[in-house]
Image: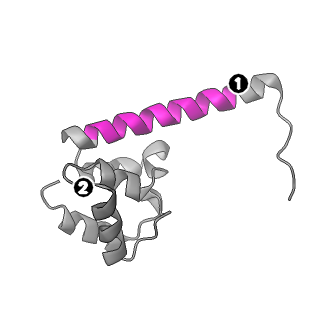
Amino acid sequence: MPLPPELSQEARQQALAKAAEARRARAELKEKLKMGSVNLRELFDLAETDDTVAKTKVVSVLESLPGVGKVKARRIMEEHEISGTRRVRGLGSKQREALLREFSGS
């Protein structure tokens, strides 16, 4: 297995800062989903332009919806044949529509 490229201290710090910002943005998004200030349709629209949203795992998004826990999120993903590692950007149009139907109140 090849080793990752060596980074200068400055490049490493920039990469760490970028990763921390992405984690903060995902946490903020999940909190908005929990509070109901963002719904699933808005999230899908936002994923078209926002890389952080697009790279968020679908299971994480579903678990953040009100009334959906880990078990229910995985069951829904299995029902709609969505891989557990799928990210929002990777959802097909039929999978998106199925999730929107499932959470029509979201």
How far apart are the two marked residues, 2 and 1, measured between alpha carbons?
36 Å
Expressed as whole percent of the image width and height from the top left, the position of residue 2 reads 87, 55
Residue 45 left/right relative to 5: left
The residue to which callout 1 is attached is: 13
Nearer to the camera, 79 or 92: 79
> In the rendered view, would you say 65 is above or below 84?
above
Name the quadrant of the N terminus. bottom right
Nearer to the camera, 62 or 52: 62
Expressed as whole percent of the image width and height from the top left, the position of residue 19 reads 59, 34
The residue to which callout 2 is attached is: 68
* Secondary structure, magenta segment, majority class: helix
What residue sits 39% from the left and 52% below the top? 60
Q: Amino acid at mark 2?
A: Val
What residue sits 27% from the left and 37% below the top? 32
What residue sits 20% from the left and 67% below the top? 102
SS at circle 2 = loop
Q: Residue furthest front?
A: 71
Nearer the camera: disc 2 or disc 1 = 2
Q: Reading the chain from its start, which is encountered first: label 2 or label 1? A: 1
User: To which quarter of the image does residue 5 belong?
Assistant: top right
SS at circle 1 = helix
Would residue 15 be counted in the magenta stretch?
yes
Mark 2, other Cα within 10 Å: few <14 / some 14–19 / many ≥20: some
Would residue 85 be counted in the magenta stretch?
no
Residue 99 left/right relative to 1: left
Which mark identifies residue 47?
Answer: none
Numbered range of the magenta stretch: 14-32
> In the rendered view, would you say 60 is above or below 9?
below
Residue 27 left/right relative to 10: left
For the residues labelled 2 and 1, say whether their Cβ atoms are less than 8 Å apart: no
Expressed as whole percent of the image width and height from the top left, the position of residue 41 reads 25, 54
